[in-house]
């Protein structure tokens, strides 16, 4: 008999139907006559209750059906007598595929997130991580659907690159050179002998190559792993994260902000519409305000705020007694505490901040005529701070060339990029959404290490 998934069994109203279910035992309880097994197979947060009657199946034959064991159960779906579910299974036979003895680390409920991180190979079997990982899949699917429906092409940019898109020097070097030999004093490093014949690194962003796609295909998006060697041990930074980067020809600042807002609202609404059970669980166990916050964002118009106005609001707040750890002044790079003040306390809605001082932004952003600011459009979210970084791109060859020179970015690495401005240049814009920052928002989880299966952070590359 073909296997029935738990999610299908639970929605079945054909009582008396024979089915086979397979999955992992969450709990087992009972008395000397009967045993109740809660079975989960990952298809839903909910468990199927399997009732084992010892007059039909001997107690001894299910001695290995313990928490964590993997089993196959054959039986009949019946209307449940107990509270909490409408269907349960009366077992006819149970086969144990893989037992789990008393050393199985997920015996009891209520482990700390820190402990679960140490057993990240097993934590997907918990309710919380099951919910998070199903939501993660759903968000990825929503993202592809959103862009596909708009006619954007999924464009694959390289993970190994010789250019530093953000210019922040946070790149992981890629080499096949023998570092031990070099360390032993056999330097200087001869990169012509390295695999690619020059220094290369893991990408910090696919944007520059994404611009090549947009200026040919019209509109593209990337969705792939991104690497940053920033030594920030915070609940919002990973060394390896996933980024979605749409890039669109002929788009201006207003249209870019419209797209950013439409996109995140679409993802949030998708979660509300398609992941109700998992969200209900997370709302109950992790963050009581989660669903309300998601609904609020899906229905609210985002504030659009020039950086200069934002600084005025923050300075006013300081004057009125608000204490920040980092100073506020025109030209400062906003800290997360500043962003969160604007979003959570002042406006109480997401904010799209625009027109930043050029000194704190990357070289490629379109320069405003004031000579001081650039057309950045970052989206700031409650709880998270910056969730999207975006901008209109400088399409003027001379201005872009001058900025690259001014910042001492090696011109030889930039030839191909400048060609987009040399041949048939066009106005264009794009943004990057940190996938795990979106995941933090839609799950209510507090730490970015808990919304990706195997987090990479300073001093941690386990599994
Ligand atoms: O603001 P960022 O650095 O922008 C770029 O990389 C642009 N090239 C994007 C573009 O315009 N195509 O990063 C974009 C987003 C941030 O808003 C944040 O959500 C996420 O990427 N991000 C991180 N997420 C997790 N861990 C980190 N270390 C992150 N750094 C950035």
Image (cartoon, rainbow, N blue to C red):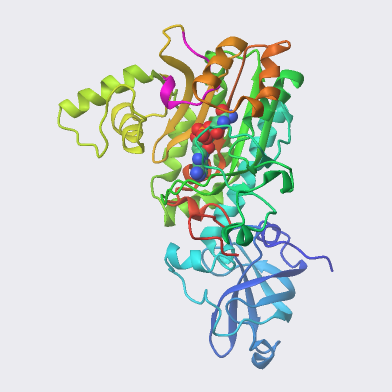
> Quick check: is 454 in the magenta stretch?
no
Horizontal side of 447 relative to 71 (left or right) equals: left
Quadrant containing the C terminus in the rendered view: bottom right
Residue 95 in the image: state x and y as whole percent.
74, 81
* Residue 173 visible, this angle: yes
Q: Residue furthest top?
A: 369
The vertical placement of 342 against 288, above or below, is above
The picture quadrant where one finds residue 89 is: bottom right
Question: Which residue appears at 43% of the width and 57% of the height?
Answer: 285
Question: Which residue appears at 39% of the width and 49% of the height?
Answer: 288
Q: Main secondary structure of the magenta part?
A: loop
* Residue 396 visible, this angle: no
Q: Nearer the viewer, residue 97 or 460?
A: 460
Horizontal side of 301 relative to 54 (left or right) equals: left
Q: Nearer the viewer, residue 144 or 332?
A: 332
Q: Nearer the viewer, residue 352 or 462?
A: 462
Q: Residue furthest bottom?
A: 60
Residue 170 in the image: state x and y as whole percent.
52, 42
Residue 244 in the image: state x and y as whole percent.
61, 35
Quadrant containing the N terminus in the rendered view: bottom right
The picture quadrant where one finds residue 150 is: top right
Residue 408 in the image: state x and y as whole percent.
52, 26
> Quick check: is 366 in the magenta stretch?
yes
The picture quadrant where one finds residue 380 is: top left
Write down the region rendered in magenta: 357-368
Tell how many labels. 0
């Amino acid at each position: 008999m073909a296997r029935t998934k738990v999610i299908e069994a639970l929605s079945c109203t054909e009582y008396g139907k024979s089915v086979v279910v397979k999955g992992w035992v969450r709990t087992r309880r009972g008395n000397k006559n009967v045993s109740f097994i809660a079975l989960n197979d990952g298809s839903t947060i909910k468990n199927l209750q399997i009732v084992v009657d010892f007059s039909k199946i001997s107690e001894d034959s299910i001695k290995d059906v313990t928490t964590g064991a993997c089993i196959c159960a054959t039986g009949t779906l019946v209307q449940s007598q107990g509270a909490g579910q409408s269907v349960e299974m009366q077992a006819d036979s149970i086969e144990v595929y893989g037992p789990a003895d008393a050393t199985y680390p997920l015996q009891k409920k209520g482990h700390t997130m820190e402990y679960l991180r140490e057993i990240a190979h097993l934590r997907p079997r918990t309710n919380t991580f099951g919910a998070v990982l199903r939501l993660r899949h759903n968000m990825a699917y929503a993202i592809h659907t959103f862009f596909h429906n708009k006619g954007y092409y999924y464009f694959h940019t390289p993970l190994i690159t010789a250019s530093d898109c953000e210019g922040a020097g946070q790149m992981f070097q890629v080499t096949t050179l023998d570092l031990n030999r070099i360390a032993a004093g056999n330097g200087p490093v001869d990169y012509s002998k390295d695999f690619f014949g020059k220094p290369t690194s893991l990408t910090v962003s696919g944007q520059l190559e994404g611009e090549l796609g947009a200026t040919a295909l019209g509109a593209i998006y990337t969705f792939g792993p991104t690497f940053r060697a920033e030594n920030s041990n915070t609940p919002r930074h990973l060394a390896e994260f996933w980024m979605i980067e749409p890039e669109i020809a002929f788009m201006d600042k207003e249209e870019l902000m419209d797209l950013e807002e439409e996109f995140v609202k679409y993802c949030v609404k998708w979660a509300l519409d398609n992941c109700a059970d998992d969200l209900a669980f997370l709302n109950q166990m992790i963050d009581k305000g989660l669903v309300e916050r998601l609904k609020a964002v899906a229905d609210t118009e985002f504030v659009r705020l020039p950086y200069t106005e934002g600084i005025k609001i923050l300075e006013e707040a300081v004057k009125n007694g608000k204490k920040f750890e980092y100073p506020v002044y025109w030209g400062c790079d906003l800290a997360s505490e500043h962003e969160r003040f604007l979003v959570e306390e002042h406006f109480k809605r997401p904010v799209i901040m625009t027109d930043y001082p050029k000194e704190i932004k990357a070289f490629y952003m379109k320069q405003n005529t004031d000579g001081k600011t650039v057309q950045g459009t970052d989206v700031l979210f409650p709880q998270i701070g910056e969730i999207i970084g975006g901008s209109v791109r400088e399409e003027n060859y001379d201005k872009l060339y001058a900025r690259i020179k001014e910042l001492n970015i090696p011109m030889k690495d930039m030839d191909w990029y400048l060609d987009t401005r040399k041949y048939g240049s066009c106005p264009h814009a794009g943004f990057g959404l940190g996938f795990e920052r979106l995941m933090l928002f839609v799950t209510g989880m507090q730490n970015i290490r808990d919304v990706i299966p195997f987090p990479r952070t300073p001093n941690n590359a386990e599994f």
